[in-house]
Amino acid sequence: MAAIVQVFQINNFDFNNMQRGVQLIFSGVNPWAAEMRIPHYYNPPFAVLFLWPMLFATPKIYLVLGGALLFAFVFYRKAWVAFAWFATNTFLWLVSAGGIDMFIIGAGLLLLIAADNSRKKWLVTLLRVLAYGILLVKPQGGMLIVAFYILLRRDWLGTLIALLVYGLPFLSLYPDWIHVILSDPPLAQTVASHTLLEKFGPWLAGMVALFVLTARRWKYWQLGGALAGILMPYGMPGLPIFLTLTAVPSLKAIPAVIVSSALLAILTWLNTSAGAVTSDYHSHLMSIYHLGMLGLALVLSCTSEPADATDSIAVVDWLKAGLRQLKAYRHAATDKPAPRLP
């Protein structure tokens, strides 16, 4: 990773915007208030608890750390097919963008793993609350992962503590932040949001999401990543593909991922004339590539059996169990003996 960030040109636009927003909050300024509004800063108010190191760092440091964290996650989960993601244009695009997405997802997932492996209840709760906060710094990528984890672990205590810690101290900032998100959404949401919901609307996105939910057993991060690429109005490019690929156990998929990425890159860029690349045209090309790779990851994962079915989210099994309980309840209600007459 250290060599890669030295070779590629890194865009620091988003990083600088986040730095400025964090500086203003620490200075006691509300960056979402109408009179002090700064453009392109959309992270939730509590994010300053985790973003303050950006004041002393550079995009390259976060990219190196983020790549290392994702590598560690792949090694721990033995999700070898996800290594192919690092040889695709999706990864290179994230590097060039200079964002902190890889760091956020990698750090959050490793904290959740550490919580699951800890035996001390107080440490489990602490690690979970920290993981929820880090992942929700980028809610478009981490919100569903957090939601599925909480439901799977039934971590109501950690949820309550997270709401208090990340809510109460910043309560005065949330109304302005929510207003900005709704009235002036991120530019990428209208120009370069590469999700099925944004590009094809709720009906197609809903049908694909339903198929994904019922196609197989999923780990919480796999399903959270897959649905983030489908249902989020403001997508996180690249990482939903990575998370979905961790659900593919067969090593035969590795060349398919790399070759497909190369072919999609060639098809979308090779025959582009110099004068044709406007911002809208560029957005369409990026959508074709990213959604094509997401579609490939979904097909590979949904048509394969999970290597480890334990501790998984199985929507079909949950529905079957619910139907069995409903039938048992109805039989119990109809088989009650008639009351005796006095």
Image (cartoon, helix red, strand yellow):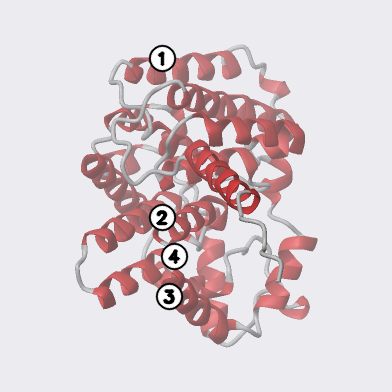
Q: Is residue 16 visible?
A: yes
- Of marks 4 and 3, which one's residue comes earlier in the chain? 4
Tag 3–tag 2 contact (CB < 8 Å): no
Q: CA distance from mark 3 to mark 1?
A: 46 Å
Q: Rate crowding at label 2 as few (under 14), some (14 to 19) or many (20 or more) other CA atoms within 10 Å.
A: many
Q: CA distance from mark 2 to mark 4?
A: 23 Å
- Of marks 2 and 4, which one's residue comes earlier in the chain? 2
Disc 2 designates what residue? 59
- As drawn, the residue found furthest toward the front would be 342
Disc 1 designates what residue? 259
Residue 10 sits above or below residue 295 on the image: below
Question: Of the numbered discs in the image, which one, if any, rests on residue 132?
Answer: 4
Disc 3 designates what residue? 157
- Of marks 3 and 2, which one's residue comes earlier in the chain? 2
Tag 3–tag 1 contact (CB < 8 Å): no
Image quadrant assignment for residue 244: top left
